[in-house]
Image: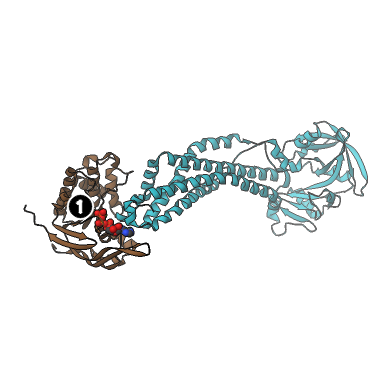
Chain colours: A cyan, B brown
Amino acid sequence: MLEIKLAFKNLLGAGLRTWLNVIVLSIAFVIILFYNGMLDGWNEQARRDTCEWEIGSGEIRHPLFDPYDPYCYQDAHKAIDADLQKLINAGEITPILVTQASIYPQGRMQNIVLKGISPDQKLLKLPSDKLNGGDGDIKAIIGHRMANASNLKIGDRLMVRWRDVQGAFDAKEIVIADIFRSNVPAIDAAQIWVSIDVLQEICVMPNEATYFVVNDEYLKTHREALAPNGWKFASKELLLKDLNDVIKSKKASSGIMYGLLLAIALLAIFDTQVLSIFRRQKEIGTYIALGMTRFKVVRIFTFEGTAHSILAILLGSIYGTPVLSYFVRAGIPMPSSVDQTGLAISASIYPVFSLGLIVSSILLVVISAMIVSYIPTRKITKLNPTDAIKGKIL
Amino acid sequence: MENEIIVKLENLVKRFPVGKSHFTALRNISLEFKKGEFAGLVGPSGSGKTTLLNIIGSLDTPSEGIATVIGKRINDLSHKAAAHLRNYNIGFIFQTYNLLPVYNVFDNVEFALLLQKMTATERKKAVMEALEWVGLTDKAKSKPALLSGGECQRVAIARAMVKRPALVLADEPSANLDSVNSNHIVQTMKQLNRELNTTFIFSTHDEKVMRYLDRVIQLVDGEVASDELIKHED
Ligand SMILES: Nc1ncnc2c1ncn2[C@@H]1O[C@H](COP(=O)(O)OP(=O)(O)OP(=O)(O)O)[C@@H](O)[C@H]1O
Ligand SMILES: [Mg+2]
């Protein structure tokens, strides 16, 4: 109690100097919140979009399948057995067949990936129902990135060339039935989706699949053995690892930025502490003469320095709350260049300020201020009270 | 008990390290102070007055000899025990007042009580009473910067007295004051000495202070040169 009262009296008594420290520290505090909230918001949005559009609750994969290696597609497929078929019928998994193909927009060849998905699936957000019907045409859906890159519109027809199971080239015309908007480049860029039945037929891979997307129901019913015989299981966390790694490295690099700001603020507090202990020796001596232990004097000064951080948090919340809550509502617009990272990102990110983030940011600011406030006070314990009372130089 | 001894110094020696050797500031001091005394240490500058008061006040320790203050041996008190002794039993008054600038008069006086277990109401009552002793009730809300030197020293007296200590140590309390103010504060202390039976030990050069003393101890070069009781005809 005594410490708190004294600390605030002394701090407010110090005027401008205190407020400069407090302002810099409060900016650091708000920026820490802003960046972390933005990255958490991105992470949350990207995880949600990736699950909804691409990976569901995990994937059952052909053992040879590696989405980053198009040359493996040739061999990474096999027949769907009766057990898997039951799961498909129950809606717990949905099969996807993948093959390499080429298209010829404006006469130039472009390699793409042709993916077959069931038009009836409900597991992913892909508008696969648009693949139904077609009076003999092969209907296809593509994402807006693919549409932009290859200059395609709904209703456009284009030639697709692929190799069948024997490796023989074949070609057919397809028609763009829909262009979907998704934040997930992994199901969009250089990809064309067709009905799995059509793909199985034209590649001569009857009833075959490359991988299956599963839902939560599947995870519950197959908790003991997630990988069916002859297949591999890739969990959601494994599939989201790249995303997590990118978010982590972004957190680290933005940490350097606000860390620098925090360091400047902490240095200013440290400096203020050193100076005030130097100038206030007489006061320290008086405290001791009045019956305070040195330990208590150390506590008073440490608390006084730490109180900068409390004022900074109060000040930061005064101007930070309207600013940050504006971004929560309006989102933070992202430059389109971020899209090239291949990670799911929307046009604007809605930052998320969780209680955990707020509490840990407050703790970071308060504890680091406490440490820099404490270090100079160790001088007090070496102080001779009789010299201090006279105000002699340390 | 009128004759209770509250400060007992036996063959006290204080040496300060100076370069490779040391300087002896107090030599073989043996003195006793009884409850209710109004005593002064006088002597030229550098004779060891402040050094002796600091040891009695447990802010410093003797190099040799024994100092017993209110039943406690200063020689072997821990930091904590010394702080406790000062907090409950010893009031200090300094030449330069040493008030806390960010606090007003009331808070400065109350400060001495904050380290003790008292309720806010008890503290307020004690502080107002102490301000009455020194005649500053109307300045309770003022900051020290707005007070005259004499008023500041009266605040310091109130701060030293508010906890009703057994012993008050005053190191040249009037050195920064004019003669009117010097007389005033010594009279105030003399009155408190009588009313509350508090022991006062001064160090002073000031003739006006000396006139009020019941006992004058002359220090020269760290030794007691004379120790006289003064009879006042009043
Ligand atoms: N910490 C110290 N280190 C070395 N010498 C010291 C120290 N403190 C005091 N002295 C010396 O001890 C002697 C006594 O000092 P002290 O302050 O007790 O004198 P004083 O009688 O109070 O003088 P004044 O009337 O000027 O206040 C002086 O010569 C002083 O220089
Ligand atoms: Mg002195």
Residue B120, can we see it?
no
Determine whether B179 is above or below A106 in the image: below
Residue toward you, B212 or A133: B212
Quarter of the figure with residue B222: bottom left
Tag 1 subunit: B
Rendering coords of residue B31 (x, y %): 19, 64
Residue A110, can we see it?
yes
Q: Mark 1 highlights which residue? A: B205
Rendering coords of residue A339 (x, y %): 71, 39
Label 1 neighbour load within 10 Å: few <14, some 14-19, many 20+: some
* Residue at image point 62% right, 47% down: A251
Q: Does the residue labelled 1 lie within 8 Å of ligand 1?
A: yes
Horizontal placement of A128 versus A271: left or right? right
Q: What element carries label 1?
A: loop
Quarter of the figure with residue A230: bottom right
**Kind of residue at badge 1:** His
Determine whether A115 is above or below A222 in the image: above
* Residue at image point 73% right, 45% down: A54
Determine whether A339 is above or below B113 in the image: above
Rendering coords of residue A366 (x, y %): 48, 48
Quarter of the figure with residue B103: top left
Determine whether A299 is above or below A28 in the image: below
Residue toward you, A338 or A57: A338
Number of dots carrying numbers: 1
Judged from the image, the quadrant occupied by ligand 1 is bottom left
Residue toward you, B162 or B91: B91
